[in-house]
Image: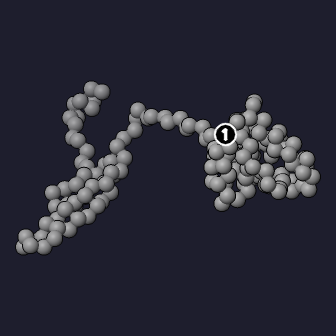
Amino acid sequence: MPQINLTPAQRKDKRADAHHLDPVVMIGGDGLTPAVVKETDAALKAHGLIKVRVLGDDRTAREAMFVQLCDELNAAPIQHIGKLLVLWRPIPEKAVVERTDARPGPRVVKIVKFSKNGNGRPQVAKLKVLGNERVAQGGEIKRAKRRMTSVKKNVAD
């Protein structure tokens, strides 16, 4: 897969964003193993912009690892400074699965209780009401009652 090409201005913005990041992947003495590539891919999927620390002293080997990672993972090379490599790849969109059997979830309800003499401020309370609950007249939360069905209808089903 080819690596992503960025303009110098885009690369500068990514470098600024990566400044405060800590390395999430470390490449040890064994070099660029398939496990390291897999872990780097997982980190790019999760974060998008990552730092990789290379523990070797050979600069040419680090540059080769940088190019190889960018090519294999379809990532953009942002920066190679010292023993740190900065890579970027856009985070893929997550598929949203809609459930057809879902019931209503919790919702927040605002309950306003006015003062008895009329001059005081009203008391406002926010309550979380679950799917099987309802708000009664006095502002109490009660569990919803099951609907009564006919015994004859239950037998027919």
Q: Is residue 66 left or right of residue 51?
A: right
Q: Is residue 132 left or right of residue 67?
A: left
The residue sitting at 91% across, 56% down in the picture is: 57
Q: Residue furthest left?
A: 117
Amino acid type, mark 1: Thr
From the viewer's perspective, is residue 82 above or below residue 146? Answer: below
The residue sitting at 49% across, 34% down in the picture is: 97
Question: Viewer-proximal residue, 50 or 130?
Answer: 50
SS category of the residue bearing label 1 = loop
The residue sitting at 70% across, 59% down in the picture is: 22
Residue 29 visible in the snapshot: no
Q: Which of the image's four quarters has the N terminus?
A: top right
Q: Which residue is mark 1?
A: 7
| Image x and y of residue 27, in percent | 83, 51
| Image x and y of residue 29, in percent | 91, 53
Q: Is residue 124 left or right of residue 67?
A: left
Residue 112 visible in the snapshot: yes
For the rendered model, the colour scheme is one colour
Classed neighbour count for the residue bearing mark 1: other residues with Cα under 10 Å, few (<14), some (14–19), many (≥20): few
The quadrant in which residue 72 appears is top right
Label total for image: 1
The quadrant in which residue 21 appears is bottom right
Question: Viewer-proximal residue, 15 or 25?
Answer: 15
From the viewer's perspective, is residue 53 above or below residue 90? Answer: below
Q: Which of the image's four quarters has the C terminus?
A: top left
From the viewer's perspective, is residue 99 above or below residue 36? Answer: above
